[in-house]
Amino acid sequence: MTREPLRVMQDMLQILEEGSFVATYKYAVLLGLIDACVARPGAEVVTSRQLANHVIALYWPQVRVHVGRVLTQNSGRQAKIVQQVHTFAVQNEGVPLVRARTQAQWQGLLDDVEHTLIEMPLPKLQRIRGETVETLFHINWTDTPAPTAREVRRPDFDNRILLLPGVGDALIQLAPLLRPFIQHQWAQKVAKLNALPEAELPEFLFGPTRGDLVPLRDGLADVQGGRCFYCDGRLGKAFEVDHFLPWSRVPSDDLANLVAADRECNNDKRDYLADIEHLVRWRRRQEAALADFADRMQWSFVPQAALLSARALYAPLTPDSRLWTGRKQWASADRERLKQALQ
C-alpha cells in the first residue's frame, strides 16, 4: 500500500520524538535519506553506500573546530562516524568536500562509515519503545548480531535500503518542511551535549562553507561573460557564488549547481526556487566550458545529477507556488513550461 505524505510525516515525527537518541546518527540518517531521494527521484532503493556518501557530506562541515574543539555528538565517547570523518578531514586539511571525494583514501572512509551505519543506526532507526515497526524502509539484516565489516564487504551482502511504496516521493515533497525541523532538533541535541547556546549552532552545522567556493568566482564569471546569471548586469568586484538549487534544499557544491551572481541578486534570491526563465538559461549553460573549468579546478561537475535534483524540487509545485524572478519580483509556477524546461 502506497504511503501518503501525511502518513510519512507522522512516522518521521514519531521517530524524532519517541526514538532513542544517544548520538546524532538518526538525524543524519533521516536527512541523508531525504538527500538520497532528492538526488534520485523515483528511486525505490537506496544503498547503504549511497547513504554513507550523504551522511559524510552532512558531517563534513561539523568536524571543523568550533569554540576550540570538535563538537561532541554522542552522550559518551565521540560518535564513531564523527571520528572517522574528522580523521579523514585532518589528513586532507583545507580540501573542499568535492575534492576530498577524489582522494585515494575516500573509499576507505566510505567503507568505515557504511559499516557504522549498517551496524548501528539503520537497524535501530525505526525502533520505538523497544519494538521495530517498518514505517519508512525494510533492510535485510539486524543488529542481533550486527554484520561485521568483513561481511559487509562481501559481494553477496545485501546493502539495500528498500523504501516502502510512496516513501521516496513523500520525502521529496516534504523535504522543505522536514529538513529545517530535523536540523533544528539536531542543533538542539548538539547544544545540549556541548553546553552551548543553540542560537550559534545552525549556521555552523548546516550552512554552506562558502569559503571553499571563493576559488571558483573568477572562472564562473568568465564562463558567464562577466554578467550576473540572474539580472544579466555587469559583475563588479562585489559578486558571489550562488547555489542555483538552494543549499537548504539541495546541499551540493557541484559546479553544475553554482552560478556567479551580484550580491544584491544573491541576497534577494536567498533560499527560493528560481523562475522558469532562469531555469531554462541554467539548462542551456555552456556545459563544455564548465566541464573544462571543472577539470582545471579538479572540481565535481555532474550536470545529470543536478538535473535530477531540479526535477525533484520543481515537480511537486502547483500553479499557486511562487518562484523568484528578480529583486522583489515573483511569478506563478507554470507546470507545463516547467515540465518542458526539465526534459
Image: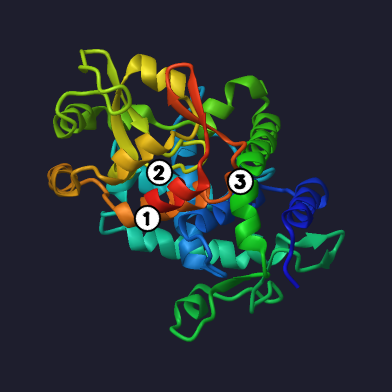
Label 2 and label 1: CA atoms lie apart by 10 Å
Please give the residue where the numbered disc 2 appears in the rendered image: 252
Label 3 and label 2: CA atoms lie apart by 15 Å
Please give the residue where the numbered disc 3 appears in the rendered image: 175
Looking at the picture, tell me which residue is in the foreground, 46 or 53: 46
Task: Tell me the kind of residue under disc 1.
Answer: Ala
In this rendering, does residue 96 appear at all?
Answer: no
Q: Residue 200: percent from the left, percent from the top? A: 59, 21
Above or below for 59 versus 32: above
Residue under the image location 66 percent in, 24 percent down: 198
Looking at the rendered image, the quarter that the N terminus falls into is: bottom right
Residue under the image location 66 percent in, 43 percent down: 178
Please give the residue where the numbered disc 1 appears in the rendered image: 305
Task: Tell me the kind of residue under disc 2.
Answer: Ser
- Is residue 144 shown left or right of residue 260? right
First in sequence, mark 3 or 2: give its number. Answer: 3
Task: Tell me the kind of residue under disc 3.
Answer: Ala
Q: Residue 174: percent from the left, percent from the top? A: 65, 47
Q: Are marks 2 and 1 in contact (CB under 8 Å)?
A: yes
Q: Residue furthest right?
A: 129
Disc 3 is placed on an element classified as: helix
Looking at the picture, tell me which residue is in the foreground, 255 or 153: 255
